[in-house]
Amino acid sequence: PKPHVSNGHSSKQLRPNADPPRRNLDRDINLLRTDVLSDEILRTLQLTCSSENPDALQAHQLTLTSLQRHKDKVDELIKNELRLIAAAGRSSKANTQDDRSDKARNRARARADGQAR
């Protein structure tokens, strides 16, 4: 397959009859894929919802609910990663300072385990 050459416009933008809500949804889904999730995306979707007919409104509300669930999951993952990073930072700092005492504790623990058997 020949390589795709970008001319600065996506094929979606070149279609004259593409309906804007769908294009906005595609944009929001792409943002979701790149993990650039924020309250701003959700606010944008809420604004889009309020300006459309009831059927579109319901569809957008479902999308909004789904995005909120994804956002909550991503927020939780981010918090977990930050905790792990902080713990790793503390442990690496502690390792350099307490390496000798850790080794001494491990030897003592090994001796205790050996005597217990």
Image (cartoon, rainbow, N blue to C red):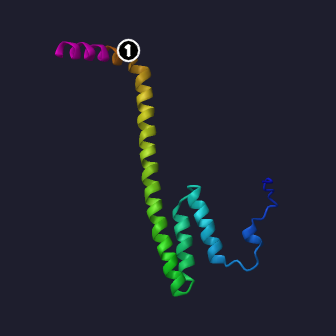
Q: In which quarter of the image is residue 114?
A: top left
**Does residue 18 sit above or below 3 in this rendering?**
below
Q: In the displayed structure, does residue 34 sit left or right of residue 2?
A: left
Q: Which residue is drawn at 51% across and 81% down?
A: 57
Q: Residue at x 70, y 77 (%)?
A: 18
Find out whether residue 112 is within the magenta segment: yes
x%, y% of residue 77? 44, 50
Q: In the displayed structure, does residue 75 sit left or right of residue 3?
A: left
Q: Classify mark 1: helix, strand or loop.
A: helix
Question: Where, quadrant-wise, is the C terminus in this rendering?
Answer: top left
Task: Magenta stretch: give its range.
Answer: 105-117
Question: Where, quadrant-wise, is the N terminus in this rendering?
Answer: bottom right
Find out whether residue 44 is within the magenta segment: no
Majority secondary structure of the magenta segment? helix
x%, y% of residue 94? 40, 25
Q: Which amino acid does label 1 sit on?
A: Arg
Of residues 98 and 107, the one nearer the viewer is 107
How many tags in the picture?
1
Q: In which quarter of the image is residue 73?
A: bottom left
